[in-house]
Image (cartoon, grey):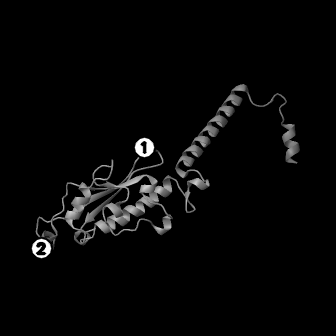
Amino acid sequence: MNFINSRKNFNPHDSGMTVIEMIVAIYMLVLFLTVSILITELSMRYLGNNDDNSKVSGIPRNAINDQYNLSLFLDRYADVLAQPSISLSKISSIESSKEGDLPLGCSFTPNLSWQLPVSSTIPSAGNWTPGGSGYAICLRSTPLRESSLSELIENNSNAKPGIYFLLGLNNEISTTKIPLRKIFCRPSSFCNY
């Protein structure tokens, strides 16, 4: 019944879209497709390829996984370096160590060159390593210098723990290799989190 009533109101002079309406519709279609292509390209840049050459032990290599794995490694090194058993002289020697063309205090294999009891791999990361992915781990101090352990134990009023940065710096400038930093306090037993 409604269809019959709508046919009675049909205007024979209503022939469709005007040229202006058609141009606006095509412009909106082109704009939508352009934006969707740009979003796809940007997401693929960070998600990376999904071929077999870009995988490490079945885990895809891309910016997101690299950042996650690098964060896990920095957490491990920060936990070890924050321990009171690592002396202030050891921290100073790490900061002044030089490996190849890297800046002072940086290493592609810090567990070996800094002689720290940290595993070179993380089980959940496959065989991902910072050096193998182009990241150097660097240790930097801040102006908040660490007091000696004896001053901290004696609870000297001027004794303060030290604040340090662990940096994950990439050896090439790229949109898929983003540097990362971790701030930590040491010795951990004298830091109030």
Nearer the observer, 164 or 20: 164
Q: Which residue is mark 1?
A: 173
- Residue at the top extreme? 19
Residue 170 position within the rendered picture, expressed as x and y whole percent measured from the top left: 40, 49
**Residue 56 located left or right of residue 70:** right
**Residue 190 located left or right of residue 167:** left
Nearer the observer, 168 or 193: 168
Label 1: element kind: loop
The type of residue carrying mark 1 is Ile
Q: Is residue 101 above or below residue 52?
A: above
The type of residue carrying mark 2 is Glu
Front: mark 1 or 2: 1
> What residue lies at 55% left-to-right and 52% top-to-bottom?
47
Q: Which mark is residue 57?
A: none
Label 2: element kind: loop
- Earlier in the chain: of badge 1 and badge 2, it is 2
Residue 110 position within the rendered picture, expressed as x and y whole percent measured from the top left: 34, 60
Nearer the observer, 33 or 5: 33
> What residue lies at 30% left-to-right and 49% top-to-bottom?
103
Q: Which residue is mark 2?
A: 154
Residue 141 shows in the view: no
- Residue at the front extreme? 100
Residue 191 position within the rendered picture, expressed as x and y whole percent measured from the top left: 24, 68
Neighbour class for label 1 at 10 Å: few (<14), some, many (≥20)?
few
Residue 22 position within the rendered picture, expressed as x and y whole percent measured from the top left: 71, 30
